[in-house]
Image: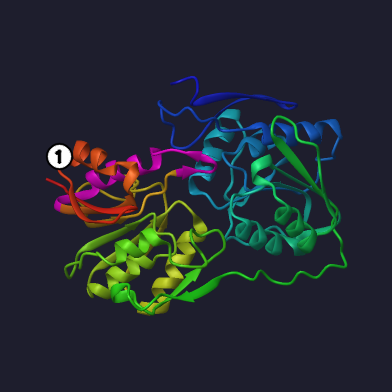
Amino acid sequence: MNPDSTSAFTTPWGTFDLTRHPVDPRERLRAWDAADEYLLRHLADESVELDGRRVVVLGDRWGALTTALAPYGPVQISDSHLGREATRANLARRGAAVTERSLLTTRDTPPERIDVLLVRVPKSLALLEDQLHRLAPAVHPGTVVVGAGMVTEIHTSTLQLFEKVLGPTRTSLAVRKARLIFCTPDPALAPGPSPWPHRYALPPDVGPASGRTVVNHAGTFCAERLDIGTRFLLAHLPTPAPGARVVDLGCGNGVVGTAAALAGPGAELVFVDESHQAVASAEETFRTNLGPSAPAEFLAADALDPALFAPASVDLVLNNPPFHSHQATTDATAWRMFTGAERALRPGGELWVVGNRHLGYHVKLRRLFGNCQLVAGNPKFVVLRAVRR
């Protein structure tokens, strides 16, 4: 294993080998950062009482915080399927017990009482808003609330959100480009329920889905409007054959798969995303437009996971791949999506991809499939089609 893909994470509670998920020998990004270090060091330096208290870790990226604090039985709440699987592996490597109640998703019912709340600030302010609203009823005046993030992730709006939902908030000095957030719960606050999900109507010129309602849970990509890449794909969407098994891969709010179902009645849709918020959004978008009994599957998974998709079991894959992992730019996710599609597609099955022109996805697709056709292009985006031979 590449020494960079397993990273020795030194904390006041010991040194642990941590990995991201899936483990990639070429991966050079660590499973922890300076914000994780800073938060754990603060807990130790301030002798924050953890024994016998309900500790909740919100947004732990790859399980660094949960793994270090394993002796205290923390509950992790995560939107990321990949992050949860990394946590599982890292806890197992530490020899710590793992239960389903200790690894919750952002869609699960949170604990009724929280004594220590540790928050890794997410990239999405909306997701933070939603989760703080969901957790606020469990917080009490004695709850210790500490947030952590890199300086680039913490803004005035972040602090205002903590203050609005939980109580008075201040920040630490920056250390190694990381910063902490300290919040004192105010029982007089009544923030009310989360304002999410949001809904909007699609514009009238995007094919079969024109004018349809899209449902977006907090943290879903482009939750306030249709992003221009997806819009370009919708304008050139293929029509699935009756009975075709179609996968909306990296489905986000599910608008692409919903449009495919509207264009090809009788197609069997599968919506896949690593975000639990996205999968919930896709299901609501699909059900809103096609009804409660229309056949479809909704999966939080790592791309076209071989455990879920047998070889030659899919006819059409529709994909708008991400090229970021938290703050890092990477094509690792796109490559995993493409290779998974090549394996899962039947002979003659097709992968349709929309992406920024400069990313050069056509090179990867030709290498993998042996072919790649430009379906449409504009100065910013291309729609590409690769056929499984």
Quarter of the rendering occupied by the C terminus: top left
Q: Quadrant of residue 65?
A: top right
The colour style of the image is rainbow
Amino acid type at mark 1: Gly
Q: Is residue 272 above or below residue 154?
A: below
Q: Is residue 292 visible?
A: no
Residue at figure coordinates x 65%, y 56% from the top left: 128
The secondary structure type at the circle numbered 1 is loop
> What residue is rendered at 41% in x and 57% in y?
299
Residue situated furthest front in the rendering: 379
Q: Is residue 255 left or right of residue 185?
A: left
354 versus 85 height, above or below = below
The percent position of residue 169, horizontal first and vertical second, equals 82, 52
Quarter of the image with the N terminus in it:
top left
Residue 146: percent from left, percent from top? 77, 46
Residue 253 position, x and y percent, is: 44, 64
Identify the image quadrant of residue 130: bottom right
Q: Residues within 10 Å of mark 1 (few under 14, many from 20)?
A: few
186 or 379, nearer to the observer = 379
Give the residue drawn at x 56%, y 70%. Answer: 197
Question: Taking 272 as reference, is 90 left or right?
Answer: right
For the image, the number of numbered tags is: 1
339 drawn magenta: yes
Q: Which residue is mark 1?
A: 370
- Who's the residue at 84% across and 57% down the image? 185
Using residue 322 as the reference point, say whether residue 30 is left or right of it. right
Q: What residue range appears in magenta?
A: 324-348
